[in-house]
Image: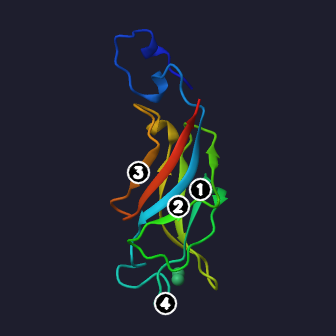
Amino acid sequence: MLSTACKKDKNIDCNSFDCLDDPPIGLVISKIVVVNYPEFVDGRNLWDSNTDADVYIDIAVDNTILLSTGYIEDAFPTSSHVFENDFPFLLEEMTTDYEIDLYDYDESSDDDWIGGFFFRPADYATGNFPRVITLNGTENQIDLELYVSWIF
Ligand SMILES: [Ca+2]
Ligand SMILES: [Ca+2]
């Protein structure tokens, strides 16, 4: 919902989504790069017995999965891994908290959740509308880059 309060006074230097004259109506993700993820499942053991995680990405809202990518086998934790086969993907709600999660695909057991982010597009719809959005987790040790374009 748009607030009109700050539009009335143009002297206010408003730089939030609610105050944009022409706010974007959607965000297209063209690819996601996993720059970094934690090496160990528990601080000392690799995600699979003796091999690195088979990493894939889910995008979800309220635990409903909207997109699930293919996985990259034995993805080295500190190398960049590009996910673009399953994209572009449109986020249609600017003010929804999307969940972007990293998983380790496991063939014979439940996949391991590596970590993730809540991502609300409106939070980034300011300034010069970035084409690359970086998500850094200090706790989950995950660095992601979202390559995006804004729909107006
Ligand atoms: Ca595993
Ligand atoms: Ca593996």
Q: CA distance from mark 1 to mark 4?
A: 27 Å
Residue at which label 1 appears: 59
Q: Which numbered disc flags the more N-terminal residue, 2 or 1?
A: 1
Query: Would you place residue 147 above or below residue 27 in this image?
Result: below
Q: How is the image coloured?
A: rainbow
Q: Where residue 46 sits in the image (x, y, percent)?
A: 43, 83
| Residue at 63% from the left image edge and 45% from the top image edge | 90
- Disc 1 marks a residue whose amino acid type is Ile
Among all residues in the image, which is located at the extreme bottom?
50
- Disc 2 marks a residue whose amino acid type is Asp
| Residue at 55% from the left image edge and 55% from the top image edge | 31
Q: Residues within 10 Å of mark 1 (few under 14, many from 20)?
A: many
Give the quarter of the figure containing the N terminus. Answer: top right
Q: Residues within 10 Å of mark 2 (few under 14, many from 20)?
A: some
In this image, 63 relative to 15: left or right? right
Query: Would you place residue 34 above or below residue 120 in this image?
Result: below
- Disc 4 marks a residue whose amino acid type is Ser
Q: Which numbered disc flags the more N-terminal residue, 1 or 3?
A: 1
Q: CA distance from mark 2 to mark 4?
A: 22 Å
Instruction: Report if the CB atoms under discs 1 and 4 are less than 8 Å apart.
Output: no
Instruction: Report if the CB atoms under discs 2 and 1 are less than 8 Å apart.
Output: yes
Residue at which label 3 appears: 134
Q: Residues within 10 Å of mark 4 (few under 14, many from 20)?
A: few
Residue at which label 2 appears: 101
